[in-house]
Amino acid sequence: WAKAEGKNQWALFDTERNASEVAQFRLSATMPAALEHNEFYVDYQPLVGLDHYRVSGVEALVRWWHPELGRLGPDRFIGLAEETGMIVSLGRWVLRQACKQARLWQDEFGSAAPFMSVNLAVRQSRDPNLVSDVAEILDETGLEPGMLQLELTESAIMSTADEPLEALRTLARMGVRIAIDDFGTGYSNLAYLRHLPVHELKIAGSFMEGVGEDQNLDPVDARIIGTVVDLSHALGLTVTAEGVETRAQATRMREIGCETGQGWFFAKPGPPEDVRTLLEAPQDAEWWRK
Ligand code: C2E
Ligand code: MG
Ligand code: MG
Ligand code: MG
């Protein structure tokens, strides 16, 4: 009996796993058509300068409005898109969308317009057409290269071979900014960063848990962040704190010396109109979450 039960459980487990594999497979198989049918869209999350508390940039975050499954976040499909290679065309679409949007804000707000930060998947960083694609999109949209930042995760940039690194160097020479995303979640060697074409470091949101009011400040987290910020500055990099959810965290990160904050305390990712409303508002430290 017990054996039979065990066997049934395995059978059940197998069926479930197969069902989810089938679902994953179907999701990845429908991605090309979804891109063609405009089921993807981009939300923008403000990056706020901690010296003046105004929006200095935005990060483009892709979403999928699936006809049956509803709204899917990137964690549901970016990995799949990496596996199938679909990320290259999806990523190019996001980049074009984001640059168009940035150009619209540039026309409307001039020097007060935010720069645009776009995530780059590992596979995109290794795509031989990366530089020409970026150049073409900048040309086509008329966005200045200095208004574009590309974010790569720590592990992506560290595992990057010679050729992709050359591509990043070329992009940097064109004036495009390169940022390391989710810093602190991998195993990179900070000193090695001096050999990479990097301008900005984004500290992973997971570190924010230990940063807050004095009574629940984790001294180890705070010191790690302090050290990372100091070393980044010594290397000539600017620093963004991701996942800032409270005023206390924003204040603390500002004291530690981070130039920029990103997180729900300031704003969740949203449609371009939300960013536009922010750009029209007179912001200062008190204005946020008042
Ligand atoms: P990421 O690049 O680190 O983006 C930040 C993520 O943190 C976003 O999740 C954002 O919604 C979330 N976030 C922002 N503020 C807070 C906060 O205060 N608290 C918490 N708990 N979370 C916050 P999202 O939009 O689900 O994106 C997840 C990841 O998917 C991104 O992480 C990025 O790695 C990837 N991704 C998104 N769009 C693209 C894209 O166009 N291309 C590629 N290759 N990857 C993308
Ligand atoms: Mg990012
Ligand atoms: Mg990040
Ligand atoms: Mg992430």
Image: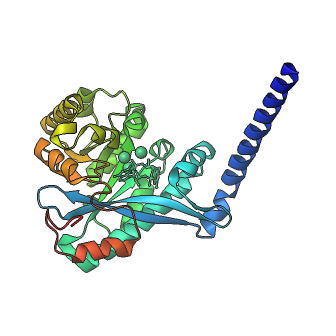
Q: Quadrant of the C terminus?
A: bottom left
- In which quadrant of the rendered view does residue 284 lie? bottom left
Front position in the image: 196 or 115:
115
Residue 60: percent from left, percent from top:
39, 60
Taking the image as shown, residue 267 lies to the left or right of residue 271, namely left
Q: Quadrant of residue 99?
A: bottom left
Furthest residue in direction front, as rendered: 1
Query: Taking 275 as reference, is 54 left or right?
Result: left
Asked whether residue 114 appears in the rendered view, the answer is yes
Q: Nearer the viewer, residue 69 or 24?
A: 69
188 or 8: which is nearer to us?
8
Q: Residue at 51%, 53% (x, y): give it.
A: 74
- The residue shown at (48%, 51%) is 129
User: Image quadrant for the N terminus?
Assistant: top right
Q: Residue at x 21, y 64 (%)?
A: 288
Q: What kind of colouring is applied to the model shown?
A: rainbow
How far across and how far down the image is residue 121, in percent?
Answer: 47, 46
Asked if 83 appears above or below 290 in the picture, the reply is above
Q: How many marks?
A: 0
- Is residue 197 in sight in this rendering? no
How far across and down, in percent of the image, does residue 80 sit?
60, 46
Q: Is residue 56 above or below residue 14?
A: below
On screen, 113 above or below 186? below
